[in-house]
Each structure stands twice: as C-alpha cells, then as structure tokens.
Image (cartoon, helix red, strand yellow):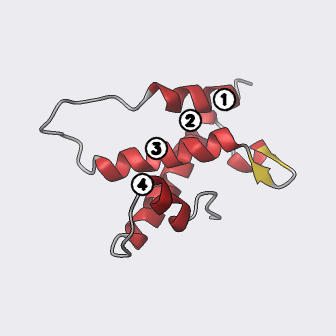
C-alpha cells in the first residue's frame, strides 16, 4: 500500500525527532489511511486530483495517526477524550453514500 503520509511527514506533524518509532509510525500511517478509506467507503485514490490527494484527507490521516500514537491503549487513565471534531469535519465530505 502506498502511504499518502510518509514517516517523515508524520514525525514532523508529531514533533518526533528520533528514529526509534519509525516502524511503528509507518504502521500507524497505514492504519489511519485504511481506517479513513473504510469510513468514506472508497479508496483514497478516488479522491486524488492530478495525482495528489486532497490536503484535507492528508491532514485527517495525520490527525488520526497522531491520536493512535498518543493513545496506544484502549483505556486511558486520564480524562477520556473523543477524537477531535476536525477529523470528522475533514473526512465527512468524501463519504460515498451511493
């Protein structure tokens, strides 16, 4: 699977400057991408124009992967917070309803 958000781009988004988590970040980027494709019910490649993915979807991948990175376990011992509304805002326009 081609990643729309590279490990380097995800590290920049997360302000990570070490290489220990590179493999994990790559898997999170792939997981976020697959999750968004499932949510919008079509491949992200359908949302490309001129070979480029819509920036809203690029940012949605970063937000979702960042959430996975920050919250690695299903139970948080701090206040539970839903994913930011921005993720839904960024992805909802691309849902295929038919």
Label annotation for residue 64:
3
Upstream in sequence: badge 2 or badge 1: 2
- Name the residue tied to disc 2: 39
In the rendered image, the quadrant that contains the N terminus is bottom right
Taking the image as shown, residue 59 lies to the left or right of residue 82, namely: right
Residue 67 vertical placement versus 30 (above, below):
above
Q: Which structural element holds mark 1?
A: loop
Q: Residue furthest bottom?
A: 19
Decide: marks 2, 1 in contact (CB < 8 A)? yes
From the viewer's perspective, is the residue at label 4 or at label 1 nearer?
Answer: 4
Tell me the tag on residue 14: 4
Which of the two labelled residues, at mark 1 and mark 3, occupies the earlier sequence position? 3
Say whether residue 11 is left or right of residue 72.
Answer: right
What distance separates the C-alpha of mark 4 from that of mark 2? 23 Å
Residue 63 position, x and y percent, is 47, 43
Measured from the top left, where is residue 91 in percent x and y?
Answer: 60, 32
> Does residue 82 lie above or below 49 as drawn?
above
Would you name the residue on which mark 1 appears? Answer: 95
Give the distance between the C-alpha atoms of the residues marked 2 and 1, in whole angstroms. 7 Å
């Amino acid at each position: 699977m081609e990643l729309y958000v590279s490990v380097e781009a995800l590290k920049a988004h997360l302000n990570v400057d070490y290489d220990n988590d590179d493999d994990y970040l790559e898997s999170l980027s792939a997981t976020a991408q697959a999750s968004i494709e499932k949510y919008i019910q079509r491949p992200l490649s359908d949302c490309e124009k001129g070979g480029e993915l819509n920036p809203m979807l690029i940012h949605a991948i970063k937000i979702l992967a960042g959430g996975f990175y920050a919250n690695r376990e299903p139970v948080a011992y701090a206040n539970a917070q839903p994913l930011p509304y921005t993720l839904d805002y960024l992805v909802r326009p691309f849902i295929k309803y038919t």
